[in-house]
Image (cartoon, grey):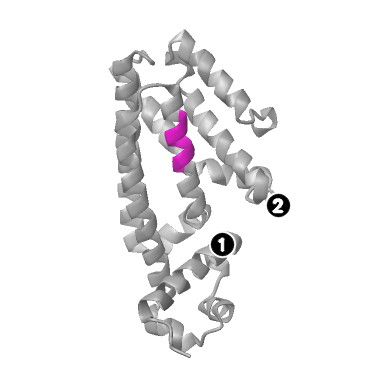
């Protein structure tokens, strides 16, 4: 039987590692567990990724590339529906790499590269949200003074960044599983957009409430 190409093996290691990190949390997953899950020797794992930190960094790099591409789409938002789609897509990407957010403080405390990189992530998110607000302002969907725009954008980024943590604390056993996870993502998008309610034009405000109802407005979600 032909051996798997090194590149394919390296990708497979990342895929399995991401699944394990997401399921159990990065601090609870050892390289021994990863090797066992892959059914490869620890030496084979170390050949591709000599340290667990390199696995974390490689996964972050994949997330960061996808995030930057997605954030560019914020420029095209003109109304509530555009913003809803953008934010839900963003939450889905965060969900794919949720271990980064679930274990964020722990990861930053022991990984200097990640600490610096996540500061850039926050700045990029804030820039994208400001771009979204600018587009919605130009189209007349929102009316928000320049002085309030920065604070609102910051609040939106905070909710984006820590929403999954909130959901996890609220219901640790079920929040990040199956249908409950999808409802959590929808609630996250809804709560981020609800920060704009005071500034939305009446028709846009009504449309936001309609979207929230159509996509599972869940009062129990806070």
Image height of 220 relative to 47, above or below? above
Pick the front one: 164 or 8: 8
Residue farthest along the top direction in this orientation = 202
Main SS, magenta residues: helix
Q: Is residue 71 above or below residue 23?
A: above
In the rendered image, the vertical position of residue 154 relative to residue 89, given as above or below? above
Q: Residue 64, position in %: x, y? A: 35, 53
Give how far across and how far down residue 210 sits, in percent. 57, 19
Q: Residues within 10 Å of mark 1 (few under 14, many from 20)?
A: some
Residue that numbered label 2 is attached to:
173
Q: Position of residue 134 (x, y in %)?
A: 29, 23
Badge 2, how many Cα within 10 Å: few under 14, some, many 20+?
few
Q: Position of residue 180 (x, y in %)?
A: 66, 44
Question: Which segment did they paint magenta?
Answer: 84-90
Q: Are marks 1 and 2 in contact (CB under 8 Å)?
A: no
Q: Nearer the viewer, residue 182 or 158?
A: 182
* Mark 1: secondary structure: loop
Q: Identify the disc placed on residue 182.
A: none
Q: Which residue is mark 1?
A: 25
Confirm whether the magenta stretch covers residue 198: no
Q: Quadrant of residue 147?
A: top left
CA distance separating discs 1 and 2: 14 Å
Q: Quadrant of the C terminus?
A: top right
Q: Secondary structure at mark 2?
A: loop
Q: Residue at x 35, y 15 (%)?
A: 144
In front of the other: 26 or 115: 26
Chain-order first, disc 1 or disc 2: 1
Seen in the picture, residue 215 relative to 196 is either above or below; the reply is: below
Left or right: 100 with respect to 212?
Answer: left
Report the residue at 31% width, 47% height from top: 68
Residue in view at x 45 percent, y 88 percent: 43
**Residue sitting at 53 percent across and 53 percent down?**
102
């Amino acid at each position: 039987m032909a051996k798997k190409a090194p590149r394919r093996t390296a990708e497979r290691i990342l895929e399995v590692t991401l699944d394990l990190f997401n399921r159990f949390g990065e601090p609870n997953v050892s390289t021994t567990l990863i090797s066992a899950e892959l059914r490869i020797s620890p030496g084979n794992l170390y050949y591709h990724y000599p340290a667990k930190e390199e696995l974390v960094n490689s996964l972050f790099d994949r997330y960061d590339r996808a995030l930057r591409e997605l954030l560019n789409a914020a420029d095209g938002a003109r109304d509530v529906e555009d913003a809803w789609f953008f934010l839900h897509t963003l939450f889905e990407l965060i969900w794919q790499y949720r271990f980064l957010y679930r274990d964020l403080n722990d990861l930053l405390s022991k990984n200097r590269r990640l600490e610096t990189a996540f500061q850039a992530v926050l700045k990029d998110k804030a820039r994208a949200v400001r771009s979204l607000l600018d587009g919605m302002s130009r189209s007349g969907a929102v009316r928000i003074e320049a002085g309030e725009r920065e604070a609102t954008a910051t609040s939106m980024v905070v909710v984006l960044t820590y929403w999954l943590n909130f959901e996890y604390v609220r219901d640790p056993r079920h929040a990040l599983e199956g249908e409950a996870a999808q409802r959590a993502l929808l609630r996250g998008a809804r709560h981020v957009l609800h920060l704009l309610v005071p500034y939305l034009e009446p028709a846009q405000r009504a449309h936001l409430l309609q979207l929230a109802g159509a996509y599972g407005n869940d009062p129990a979600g806070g």
